[in-house]
Image (cartoon, coloured by chain):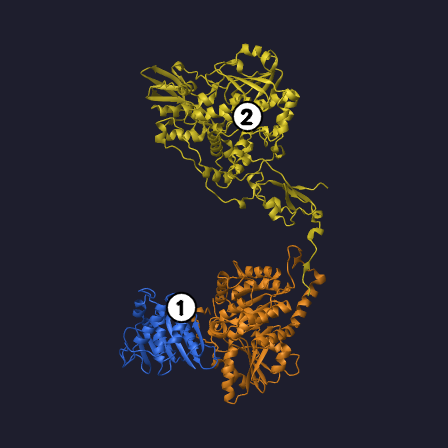
Amino acid sequence: MEEIRFHGRGGQGTVVASIILAKAFFKAGYYVQTFPVFGVERRGAPVEAYLRLDHQKIRVRSNIYTPDHVLVQDTKLLATVDVTRGLKPGGWILLNAAALPDAEAFPGFRVAAVDAARIAVAHRLGTRTHPMINTAMVGAFARILEAPPMAALEEAIRQEVPVKQEENVAAAKDAYMEVRVPGQENRQGKTYEG
Amino acid sequence: MRISRSNVSTEINKTGSWRFVRPGYDEKTAPCSNACPVGQDIARIEMLMGQGMFPAAWETILRENPFPAVCGRVCFHPCERVCNRGEMDSAVGIHHLERFVGDLAIERAYALPHPFYGDEAETDRRATGGKTVAIGGAGPAGLAAAYFLARLGHTCDIYEADSEPGGVLRWGIPWYRLPEDVLKAEISRIVDMGVKIYCQKPITRDFMARAREQYDAVFLGCGYGRSLPLWIPGEEKVLNGLAYLHDIRGGDNTCTGGRAAVIGGGNTAIDVARSLTRLGVEPILVYRRRRQDMPAFDHEVEMALAEGVQLMPLVAPVRIDGGDGGMVLTLQRMRTTRMETAGGRCRVEPDGDRTETLMVDQVYSAIGAEPGENWLFPPEHQPGQLRMSHCILWEHPDARLPVVFGGDLTTPVKSVTDAVASGKQAAMALDTRFRHGGKAIPERLGACRVGDGTALSMEIYLSGRRKTRNPAIVPFSALNTDYFAPAERQAPPVLSPETRCGSFEEVEGAYGRDAAVQEASRCFNCGICNDCDNCRLFCPEVAIYIDGTRCINLDYCKGCGICVVECPRNAMTLEEEAS
Amino acid sequence: MKEVVEGSHAVSEAVRLARVQVMSAYPITPQTHIVEALSEYCADGRMAARFICVESEHSAMAAVIGAASGGVRTFTATSSHGLALMHELLHWASAARLPIVMAEVNRALGPGWNIWMDQTDSLAQRDTGWIQLYCEDGQEVLDTTLLAFRLAESASLPVMVVLDAFFLSHTYEPVDIPDQASVDRFLPAFQPRIQLDTQDPFALSQMAPPGCYMEMRHDIEAGMRRIPEHYTAAEEAFASVFGRRYGMLEAYRCEDADIILAMAGTAVSTSRQVVDDLRERGEKVGVLKLRMFRPFPAALLASLAGDARKIAVLDRNFCFGVGGIFAQEIRAALYLMDSRPPVYSYIAGLGGRDVTPETIEEIYVRTKQSERPAPESVWIGLDPAACPVCRTD
């Protein structure tokens, strides 16, 4: 079983990101379970969502304490939230950021970054001040995890996003291409399989 | 499966047997109607107005008063002083509404309702056997007497001393309060009913002596046309206020500018002062009591002060000196005493020998009036008289026919609406005398009283629907005010004091249609049913049903009284069952 | 077809498929998603139903009582304070024998204000004459809602379908949503036993004087006593169409268990995992899933758990002055049985506090190590440092 934790802010589509990813994994043959950590429902407040993946029925229904990977929709959260809390060594941290952080910033983990805000604005998703970056984030995440396949993700996005489905799919694809990992500074121009 | 379910109608349970008090529809008298000298059915009028049923509202007024457009303007509206709505926010603008519908009727040429009182048989019965009545004076009393007598099937001839009919309405009230065309329209309605008006033909003693040859009765409503004298030295220099108003309305302007003293505190004094301002004179009101003691309507006093009229209270004129170059009015300072008059005004007495003087160009007197000729006074201590609230019927020994004294001659309050009331009372008294003899008058007229006051209802006299109205007056405490939300009184447009001073244009405007409906809707309709249906909807026994009108099924009414409590307007009463 | 849906929408889908005719509800977290979806179904024509908007839960229940008296299939949903506000009308519904189905999302009662998982709200309604069924995952929520209509209509008693706040109501997981034809086969159109008719009027729910009130109460109890029979028949029918069945209680790996963990809701699901893990380590442990709480299946409980050496009950609820409510019920049910294992009462997971595999394992270990149950419920995971600002002593 793999466990993923999503960090974001109220209004950033963090819960929707977890649902899109869950549906995409389900289409790819996984058993999934996703749920938000519900607190005070308020725009801008830090929110979390959880996603469990397995090849059999998931029976544990408690919160996730030791995630395999985390997805961070807003790097400003790093100042107040320990996104590595319980994160298993070697787990991925995907950041919505224009550049990768210093190599020593997250020792023991794998870090990836995608400029989801720029991608979202380029596809006119949300506004310049509040870009809707969640579909770009899941696109990037699909690339670093090498799952789910882009076709499943596309289908999930079309199903779950109420407006601008094609722009969201395009944002996910761009992010899939543009996500950066250490040692692979620029993956632009490469094709993705799926 | 056991559930509590019943297929039997609750009709088997005749809850009526539980009852020891019985509710009933019991329309009562609104305080406004009680206070109205002519007893207009104001609660119903406003109900109809609130529903936009203007012709029906107008007809309801016409049953009791031939002059809605006139009285809407000049009546001092005692109705509004006692309006129950005043206890919640502010009184309903009854006179504005009356004027609105009166004007509308003139504009749209509403026809008089026929049959007048909703009873065709009564109208038919009255088509024959009518009498002929001579009426002295075409003022509000005489015109009203003619209107009601004509309505009752009699023929009337009015003899008027002046050149045009209207009396005080035509000659005593300035245009800015009562435009001439409004008066003419309401008088012409009476003429159209077949009443003949002979102008410049005063009733004389000779006429009285020969009246019997032509007439079955005479009504004398000649009014108080002559100002009372001041009885002070220099009196000959004083101008007569009433005569002055008469001249203005006749088209003559005798004033020459400058300053004028107007002596008096009544409505005539105010009318004179306000007319003077419109003609470029600076008037000073000289009054022996305080402002709050002035018999003039407070509203009129306020308007006068706003227009620049000055008031000198607590001074009484003692002499007038000088001539054309200016007059010196010597005034005695007055002071209040602890005593009050019967009318609640303070008594005053000379404040030692303190005097002051006032330099003016003219002096007008308006301290009261009396009839033009002494024989017009109703007789005192003569046999064969029936003294009623607003008129006196005298079986005239010389003329050998019934003579009724009305209008200012006999009314308790010298007002236009009281004059109309006297005309109506005279018409009812004479009609009763013609048909049932003079002895029947007290009882028959007594049965037509509205509420507990002196006003009589012609609708009741003719056995109209209002006959069933309980004379009990609805107090504010009897209303269920939970059903009434506070609402501001609608104010009609009023000319600014600056505009007013320049002309005799009418000062107060009229409501628009929407304002009229809104204002009429503020009326609680005290004591009368407006079909709100609360009684039926709230009845826990479903014992109230509609079969043409609302009925109470006494087999089921258990006397809980909810209908009576939920009636917002006290149109129902709970009575103990007779054992 | 299997789809990833939220637990709340598993309820909504079942209500849609059940062809409910009248619904009424007032929104309250965490129930809102259920009726939000249903009101959309009504608005866009996917359901031929009336959704009556009301100003409170009390009115919502009153509205469905009225509709059910008119002989139509009805549904409502609520949670926590909303259910508390409905309390009076719950009695009206059951004593009028109306087959109303309600989804109730378990949420804590305030103050302190708390929107999270806690079973006290539904358990506090245990004496209202409603059947109560507790669910552990999304599939069970959908299936139980469908089953509830058939059960309610065959027994003429209302049914409450209970699901955990957030851990179930807001959790997305794969759920098999059946097609309409299959549901229609399982759940034919409602044939009302009570139907108001303006052409042939009668009165319902009126006065029952002392001379008949007891008989009427006894009759409701007789109806409750027949629920196992109706339930089993409904489940048979359900299984024949959909191939799934749940039972009134479910014993998971209890056959030779020394210690049986008993509980309701999503904690059952987590406990299955814990039991498997403990079994691998040689522990003889099982889970007893409490699915039907009213009527309480006492005899079945005794037959499934009577042979254990100990029963440990996890209550995500509390009755002040007594203890865990499920534990009380289980003790009472075993009292007249020949074999009565001692019942250990544990309180955990109140007000949204997580029940993790570790929590469950701690309960197991404590039970195993204790000679006999403590006289009072044992609270698991109390943090003495929590909420220092709230202390007034």
Q: Secondary structure under badge 1?
A: loop
Badge 2 and badge 1 in a common chain: no
Q: Amino acid at mark 1?
A: Val
Indicate the quadrant where residue B360 lies.
top left
The residue lying toward the viewer, choosing from B255 and A7, is: A7
Residue B207 location, x and y as percent?
A: 55, 11
Location of residue C130 with respect to B205 vertically, above or below: below
Seen as rendered, the residue at the extreme bottom is: C282
Subunit ID for the residue under disc 2: B
Of badges 2 and 1, nearer the viewer stands: 1
Q: Which chain is blue?
A: A
Q: Amino acid at mark 2?
A: Ala
Q: Give how far across and how far down residue C145 sits, in percent.
A: 55, 70
Q: Is residue C270 above or below residue B325?
A: below
Identify the residue position indicated by label 1 in the image.
A161
Mark seen at residue B421: 2
Task: Tell me the residue at 49%/23% (across/down).
Answer: B188
- The chain displayed orange equals C
Q: Would you say A158 lies left or right of C284 here?
A: left
- Chain shown in yellow: B
